[in-house]
Amino acid sequence: METLQQVIAMILLVLGTFLSLVGVIGFIRLPDVYTRLHATGKVSVFGLVFLLLAVSILTPLTAWKGILLIFFVLLASPAVSHSIASAAYKAGVPLAGPKRDDLKSKLERGSDKDV
Amino acid sequence: MFYLSSIIALFIVYLMLTANITLPNLVLGLLVATGITLLMPKDAPMLFRIDRLPRFLWTGMQYAFVVFKDVVLGGIATARLVLDPKLPLKSGIIAIPTGSKSELGTAISAHAITLSPGELVIEMDSDGIMYTHCLDVESTAVAADEAQAKRHKLLSSLFD
């Protein structure tokens, strides 16, 4: 039982570290604000979630704390990346080589004031 | 009734976070929960009704499963894109209609979309159209409407 717990926790630790690493690599390689937010705001957050899961398994006494923290992180992180992206778009940060921009064409039509 | 259920929920969350069941901590938790409840606006919408609990739990589990599947698939796609030596990026902004009338349903849909890697809601307008930035425009544009329809079906049975 003890070893099984440790093996599962080890797998989760490796997975979490790998995802955090992918987030950092993405942050360096991707070209603009919006795509970088995908790397740091999502992939790294799931790295953190796996690390917290591993901690919850390794220290059963405070497992509830870890699970609650996962819940809060998952609840809050999309709000953070959305507000950064929205602020960047309003400040006029350009997209790197967009294939398609539905929001821009809508703003040019000017049909809706509150966007 | 709203105050009481809110105080109890916050109190349980506080106890889970501190993981310490001694009398001073219980009293402090009760005080914190009461204080936060008093700060909330009086006409805050009631998210949760006790008579709907079984359906709430069942639909909530289905919804969590749908979101979890999106998150895992999106995570794999994004990790592959980042690690690909050629970096085949096809980013862009597409419009996804929510289909939902209630503001809460729209907010939760936007949360689910932003949570899954590869999709990021940048802006919303008053018609409930979400302008979503995607890493891969072509595949997302095909899959997004179907995924949104699935989420909308589950959410509308909860909140409308």
Image (spheres, coloured by chain):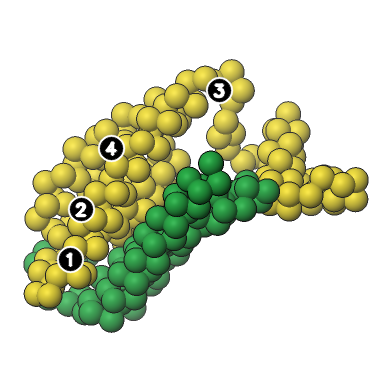
Chain colours: A green, B yellow
Q: Are marks 1 and 2 on the same chain?
A: yes
Q: Are marks 3 and 1 on the same chain?
A: yes
Q: Mark 2 sits on what residue? A: B95
Q: Secondary structure at mark 4?
A: loop
Please report whichever mark, 3 or 4, sits nearer to the chain's N-terminal start: 3
Q: Give the quadrant of residue A35.
A: bottom left
Q: Mark 1 sits on what residue? A: B81
Is residue A70 found left or right of B41 in the rendered image?
left
**Label 2 near label 4: C-beta < 8 Å?**
no
Q: Mark 3 sits on what residue? A: B53
**Label 2 near label 1: C-beta < 8 Å?**
no
Q: Secondary structure at mark 2?
A: strand
Q: Amino acid at mark 1?
A: Leu
Q: Position of residue B23 (x, y in %)?
A: 90, 45
Q: What separation in Å lies between label 1 and label 2 (alpha carbons)?
A: 23 Å
Q: What separation in Å lies between label 1 and label 4 (alpha carbons)?
A: 30 Å
Q: Are marks 2 and 3 on the same chain?
A: yes
Q: Secondary structure at mark 1?
A: helix
Residue sitting at x 48%, y 60%:
A51
**Label 4 near label 3: C-beta < 8 Å?**
no
Is residue B106 found left or right of B6 in the rendered image?
left
Q: Are marks 1 and 4 on the same chain?
A: yes
Q: Split into 4 quadrants, where in the image is the C terminus of chain B?
A: top left
| Of B146 and A54, the residue lying toward us | A54
Which one is closest to the eye, mark 3 or mark 4? 3
Q: Position of residue B97 (x, y in %)?
A: 24, 44
Residue sitting at x 19%, y 63%:
B80
